[in-house]
Image (cartoon, grey):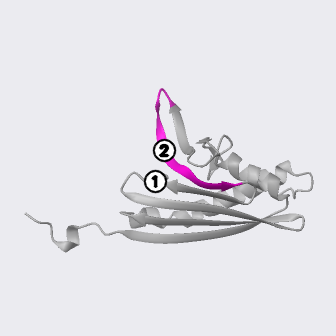
Amino acid sequence: MKPDASERPSVETFEIRKEVEISAPIDIAFEAVLDQLGPEGQMPGDKPFPMKLEAWPGGRWYRDLGNNSGHLWGHVQVIKPPTLLEVCGPLMMSYPAANHLQYRLTAEGNLTRLAFVHRAMGLIPPDQRDGFAQGWQYWVERIRDLAERKSPKGKKR
């Protein structure tokens, strides 16, 4: 028996863009990106969420839960310190999906501008899709805060 069209999942796509100004030099801001994607990762509510990032082309980005268990979030597609990091992979999605994250940093005098883009396609449930924008806003603000704490000229927020 064939399912009718209303029962077939549909492929969804979305694109989220976030931008933040960081009061820190570009090298420190890039290091903060790596920290948030790595050992200093946090989720909303200041919940620690340490990850492992192998910061080279093809390197893995994953959550290590110990005892050979965990979650693969993606692979480094492009890394050009201190201006660009791109990651592609399933991220936190446990269903058919492809994602691309881009962190582009630009020096602007004593500041750094971080432009973040998340593009996704797959069988993405609407309730999950709708929460990504808020989560990524927290994520880029966390990167800003990490960088500004490390920078001698950083703002104290």
Q: Mark 2 belongs to which amino acid?
A: Leu
Q: Is residue 88 left or right of residue 153?
A: left
Task: Identify the residue at horizontal 63%, vertical 46% (top origin).
Answer: 56
Q: Secondary structure at mark 1?
A: loop
Q: In the rendered structure, which disc, 1 or 2, sits on the residue that comes first in sequence?
A: 2
**Alpha carbon separation for disc pair 1 and 2:** 8 Å
Q: Main secondary structure of the magenta part?
A: strand
Where does the C terminus fall, quadrant-wise?
A: bottom right
Q: Is residue 102 left or right of residue 109?
A: left
Task: Identify the residue at horizontal 23%, vertical 67% (top origin).
Answer: 8
119 or 85: which is nearer to us? Answer: 85
Q: Where does the image place residue 3, in percent across and percent down from the top left?
A: 15, 66
65 or 45: which is nearer to us? Answer: 65
Q: Mark 1 belongs to which amino acid?
A: Pro
42 or 99: which is nearer to us? Answer: 99
Q: Where does the image place residue 142, in percent across and percent down from the top left?
A: 71, 55
Residue lying furthest left: 1
Residue that carries the numbered disc 1 in the rendered image: 90
Task: Identify the residue at horizontal 53%, vertical 61% (top origin).
Answer: 100
Name the mark on residue 72: 2
Say if mark 1 contacts mark 2, CB within 8 Å. Answer: yes
Name the mark on residue 152: none
Residues rendered magenta in the picture:
66-80
Where does the N terminus fall, quadrant-wise?
A: bottom left
Judge whether residue 104 is colored magenta: no
Task: Identify the residue at horizontal 40%, vertical 67% (top origin).
Answer: 126
Q: Is residue 80 left or right of residue 77?
A: right
Q: Where does the image place residue 121, in percent across and percent down from the top left?
A: 42, 66
Q: Quadrant of residue 135?
A: bottom right
Mark 2 Cα-neighbour bin, 10 Å: few <14, some 14–19, many ≥20:
some
Judge whether residue 77 is colored magenta: yes
Q: Is residue 114 left or right of residue 157?
A: left
